[in-house]
Amino acid sequence: MKGKSKSRIMAAILACVLCVSVFTACAANTGTAEPPADAGTAAGAPEGTDAVESAPAGGNGTAEPAAELKRPEPISGTEVVNIADFSEYTKKEEGEPMTFALLLFSRGFEWMIGLQQEFEATCEQLGVTPIVLDAQGSDDTQLDQIQDMITQRVDAIILTPNSNDGLVAGVKMAQEAGIPLVTCESEVEGDIVPIHVGVDNYQMGQLAAEFIADKIGGKGKVLECRGALASLSSTARHDGFVETIANYPDIEVISKNTEWVSTEASSATQDVLTANPDLAAIYSHNDEMQTGIQSALREMGRLVPTGEEGHIVLVGIDGTPLGLERLREGVQDACVVQDPFDQGKYIANYAYDFLTGKDVPRKTLTQPYVVTQDYAALDVLWGNHEFEAVE
């Protein structure tokens, strides 16, 4: 980065207090982490989602009425950036035609489809032309796509990196070409992009660990199905989990590299459960892998509904449509939710504001929260909205 960043304490950030909106039934009965309520964001940030009241989710047994639930607002850091601080970039005027390229590491996940759809909707509101490309899990493909977007002279590139270190060269290529490249969902190695919007991945691991420790009484064996080892998101979800579980000396974590993939998670589940028939819980770094996990449990005759003897506690991350459906059916215990709508909305708005000369937060993290069966039908949850078919 050639320019320097300005650090300011934004009044909106100083004023924000991260509150807690109470999951009454869940917190009292299941040890579910309480989701934070609205928190302040940077001046000019997109508006959040209002609280929604909803009927209780369906499933086994009768759920207590769901409390009011607020989707927590993203938290922005105190450091802001302005295009004037970067000699390599050229300021645009509001209303000037612009094109933003969203380079997804893969469209093979419902979460990524949600991010894309909200990004495209926000671009339409801003009068920006969106381009969306799918790298299908390849660093090389993403590097080629970055080069193609440079050749096309897009105004900004939004990257969800396939790996943390394999895309550094692509970031530098864009900078040298005078095109701002910003990251979303996951980061690249080093402090080299002007803007990042993501989620507190470490906290997601923490929330999963506390939920599982409570459900299994602080003792037992837990299988962890990890995302890609080269991903900073996966690393943080692992670190948050194992460092929190370390507070429970009678819990043993068995970690397996399953690369975000359902079939890999299925194989790991079969192997670990065969060697450890007393397995108490399975934590996966996304909800997609829970599909393979639960398929393996079903084949082995170990997929027991929640609350029944022999049930293996199941926790995934994301809060996908399938994940929420499994909560309602009483098969999966919890989803640690991260919202792609927030990330897609914020990254598009911040890229636009940056290009048009406004101060924007350098780093914004959306806040995760735990959802259980009682709350799985709430309309406020992103996974209860319609999506395009996953490719």
Image (cartoon, rainbow, N blue to C red):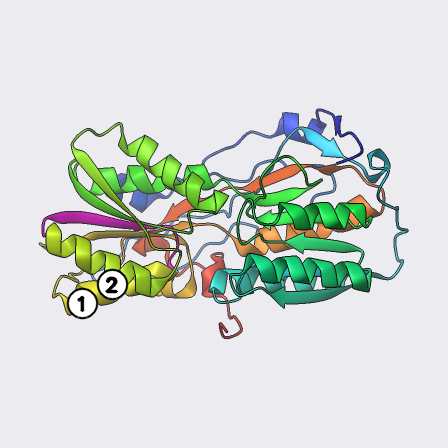
Q: Secondary structure at mark 1?
A: helix
Quadrant placement of the N terminus: top right
Q: Which residue is mark 1?
A: 298
Q: Is residue 326 left or right of residue 359?
A: left
Q: Position of residue 56 (x, y in %)?
A: 34, 58
| Amino acid type at image mark 1 | Arg
Q: Which residue is mark 2?
A: 294
Can residue 102 be seen in the rendering of this structure? no
Q: Position of residue 146 (x, y in %)?
A: 69, 58
**Label 2 crowd (10 A; few <14 / some 14-19 / many >=20):** many
Q: Is residue 253 left or right of residue 244?
A: left
| Amino acid type at image mark 2 | Gln
Q: Is residue 164 above or below residue 128?
A: above
* Residue at image point 59% right, 43% down: 188
Q: Position of residue 369 (x, y in %)?
A: 42, 44
Residue 239 among magenta residues: no
Picture quadrant of residue 262: bottom left
Picture quadrant of residue 27: top left
Span of residues in magenta = 277-287
Name the one closer to the observer, 126 or 24: 126
Name the one closer to the observer, 355 or 322: 355
Q: Is residue 154 left or right of residue 206?
A: right
Can residue 228 be seen in the rendering of this structure? yes
* Residue at image point 68% right, 36% down: 362
Q: Is residue 275 left or right of residue 372?
A: left
| Cβ–Cβ under 8 Å for marks 2 and 1 | yes
Name the one closer to the observer, 282 or 139: 139
Q: Secondary structure at mark 2?
A: helix
